[in-house]
Image: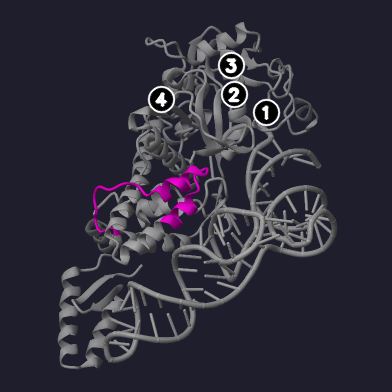
Amino acid sequence: MELRLYDTLTREKRVFTPIDANNVRMYVCGPTVYDFAHIGNARPVIVFDVLFRLLRHIYGENHVTYVRNITDVDDKINNRALRDYPGLPLNEAIRKVTEKTADQFQADVKALGCLLPTVQPRATEFVLPRPDGKTDMVMLIKELIARGHAYEAEGEVLFDTQSMPDYGALSGRKLEDQQAGARVAVDAHKKHPTDFVLWKQSSPEEPGWDSPWGRGRPGWHIECSAMAAAYLGTTFDIHGGGLDLIFPHHENEIAQSRCAHGTHAMANYWMHNGFLQVEGEKMSKSLGNFFTIRELLDDWPGEVLRLNMLKTQYRSPVDWTVKGLEESAKTLDDWYAVAADQTGGEVSPKVIEALYDDLNTPLLVAALHGLRNSAAAGNEADRVTFAASLRMLGFLSETAAAWNDRKQQASGVDAAKVDALIAERTAARARKDFKESDRLRDELAAMGVVIKDSKEGTTWEIAR
RNA sequence: GGCCAUGUGGCGGAAUGGUUACGCGCCGGUCUGCAAAACCGUUUAUUCGGGUUCGAUUCCCGACGUGGCCUCCA
């Protein structure tokens, strides 16, 4: 059994072979911290967390390096800073925006059950040459100019796309096609319409760094090229992100990195997650179906959001619906009850096998259902395996009791009152006063409490 | 317009050149004072039209639908 991953560059599933099994290296494009992350942003975070966990399982916990950057230099951030903190000096306002947003992102991701990446570098720390000598953006740009892949024009430094014979390979674009397209803005100072900015000048009001090309700031793509090289080397194993990043972001990252380093590949496997729709419609602020992770966490435990995401294979579109969330919540209630705080054990081979096929998480969920049914039927070995498998995937982060308490607390139901009503009902049933016992049951139901009678007595839970 | 992805039962969602995925729901049963829960069981599908093939949901072509990218959106 071998791990196979779909590679966007070759458009096929390929057996995964790491460059160095002692240090498997993965880079995933993280957030640009200008606004709270929405549920669509959560998808790559969760998907690549699962891959990270799988790689750790295969190669060992200390033999995988996962880098997820934080982009804290971007014109959207500048605009947001000006809007939200009009009185403050820009640099201070920017810091407030990026810190607040980055902190919220970290909290959100943790709630979703994701492990901390090995490193989370910030773009602003990689603009200028560093004391530790790690690759920085200015260094890369100088190298690109020296190698004849970039040129200066009107104060900008631009990447010369025509200098790279196979530019466009990832997205399947040809330079010729781009020329004819009327929608590609033609700037007089560009040698070719697809040439893109590596460095641009900043006005005195804009954030900037002093560089060989004057005071300015980096273009959009160069920060990932720098941070990836800084931590993972000039060629590494896996580069991931959302489908929309294929062009131009990843295409241009590849161009910059390969041309600066003189390599044949930036990453050996390019993975892209599909998009997310909400209730069958495109998520957009104007439609009012735009949810931040934070908002969803107010209504659902993070594990519910996580499971809901993993019910679909990562390359397929996800339709994010309340019905789906309810189903996921119900499933987790059941799984918590059946797993029953088991500890230890090994992850099920079936779970690993499903993940080996390009992270087939729906098949994985089916395998979990199988274990669950076996455990519920009394197979104690499978109960342990079931729990171990769930934990490996980032579930079962709390005790079953805590899981149930959370639901009760969220509902605001008074447990003592429920217990008192149930005692009354039990007494009524004992004297065969079923009219009264049914009335009490209705009263509890009106409070959102469902009761369950069994031979051992009556238990209750919060209706979803 | 160019390029890319996708279209499976009431719903979500896998797999596969020929034999029921799985989950939710529905329905039936056991249990129950009646229910609920639990457990057992049943049910329904491969967008359309061609082609290849002994045989296609699976491969090929076309149509239609949906989504994405085409300079800073995961």
Q: Chain of mark 3?
A: A
Q: Position of residue A58 (x, y in %)?
A: 40, 36
The three-letter amino acid code for the residue at tag 3 is Thr
Q: Which is more N-terminal, label 4 or label 2?
A: 4
Q: Which is more N-terminal, label 3 or label 4?
A: 4
Dot 1 alpha-carbon crowd within 10 angstroms: few under 14, some 14 to 19, many 20 or more: some
Q: Are marks 1 and 2 in contact (CB under 8 Å)?
A: yes
The three-letter amino acid code for the residue at tag 1 is Ala
SS for callout 4? loop
Q: Which residue is mark 2?
A: A254
Q: Which is more N-terminal, label 3 or label 1?
A: 1
Q: Which residues are magenta?
A: A339-367
Q: Is residue A206 above or below residue A102?
A: above
In three-dimensional space, the C-alpha distance between marks 4 and 3, rounded to whole angstroms, equals 20 Å
Residue drawn at 36 percent across, 52 percent down: A303
Do pointers 1 and 2 mark residues of a single chain?
yes
SS for callout 3? loop
Instruction: Tell which tag, 2 or 3, sits nearer the viewer.
Output: 3
Is residue A55 found inside the magenta-colored segment of the image? Answer: no
Q: Are marks 1 and 3 in contact (CB under 8 Å)?
A: no
Is A90 left or right of A270, judged from the image as shown?
left
Do pointers 2 and 3 mark residues of a single chain?
yes
Instruction: Tell which tag, 1 or 4, sits nearer the viewer.
Output: 4
Dot 2 alpha-carbon crowd within 10 angstroms: few under 14, some 14 to 19, many 20 or more: many
